Amino acid sequence: MRVVLAEDLFLLRDGLVRMLQAFGFEVAAAVETGPELTRALAELEPDVAVVDVRLPPTHTDEGLQCALAARRARPGLPVLVLSQHVEQLYARELLADGTGGIGYLLKDRVFDAEQFIDAVRRVAAGGTAMDPQVIQQLLSRRAAGDRPLAGLTPRELEVLELMAQGRSNAGIAAQLVVTERAIAKHTSNIFAKLGLEVSDDDNRRVLAVLAHLDRDR
């Protein structure tokens, strides 16, 4: 599996390269600037891109901008964002097209190699890997009285947040210590209230929910 990595800090970039290689990934390129990332994604066509948000030359949002441009040129390109920050606007834009694997992890909340590698593999396979804090911030713009979440019960909101992290009904049931049947009922109610088609595809339903919540912003 071929990876293009973008990280401007040398020690972190070198550590990520070594970790990926130790788990059998081929690091096609490890770059530190936005222009280098753009060229690498266009020329190397990796299986997955792992990108920091803020890269030189301006250290603002080059990583996400490059990822968005690459996905426009190559729809469905799997992208895992690894950042210290949640850039809500661009995170929502990445999620909103509903195609390809997407992940967004916060650097200071990645606690071991297995967690990171699992996220890379999941995203490369077309799934999602979303840090709970990212999800909370994406959902926080919808206050309790705001449409379309106003009709959801507290339990349904809790299930929605776990669903948005990419968890299956079985995973949500285990987290909340309830039956899978109960979670299936909650998810059906959530989809009905949000006007979404029911889906058993974990990735598609996550993207559908987040894209729906992104409307009318």
Image (cartoon, grey):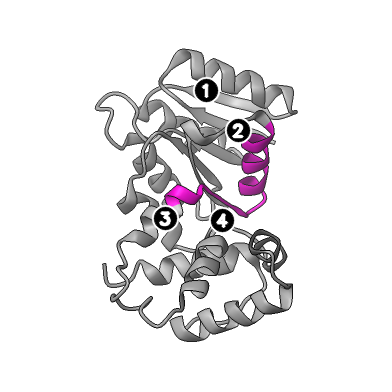
Q: CA distance from mark 4 to mark 3?
A: 22 Å
Q: In the depicted view, which residue is nearer to us: 199 or 188?
A: 188
Task: For mark 4, give the secondary structure.
Answer: loop
The amino acid at mark 2 is: Val
Residue type at the position of mark 3: Gln
**Residues in magenta, as a range:** 114-134
> Which residue is painted at 45% across and 58% down in the image?
95
- Tell me the distance, in whole angstroms, between the alpha carbons under discs 1 and 2: 9 Å
Q: Residues within 10 Å of mark 3 (few under 14, many from 20)?
A: some
User: Which is nearer the N-term, disc 3 or disc 1?
Assistant: 1
Q: Earlier in the sequence, mark 4 or mark 3?
A: 4
Confirm or deny contact between disc 4 and disc 1 (CB under 8 A).
Answer: no
Q: Which mark is residue 100?
A: 4
Frontmost of labels 3 and 1 is 3
Q: How many marks?
A: 4
Per the image, is 122 magenta?
yes
Residues marked 2 and 3 touching at CB (< 8 Å): no
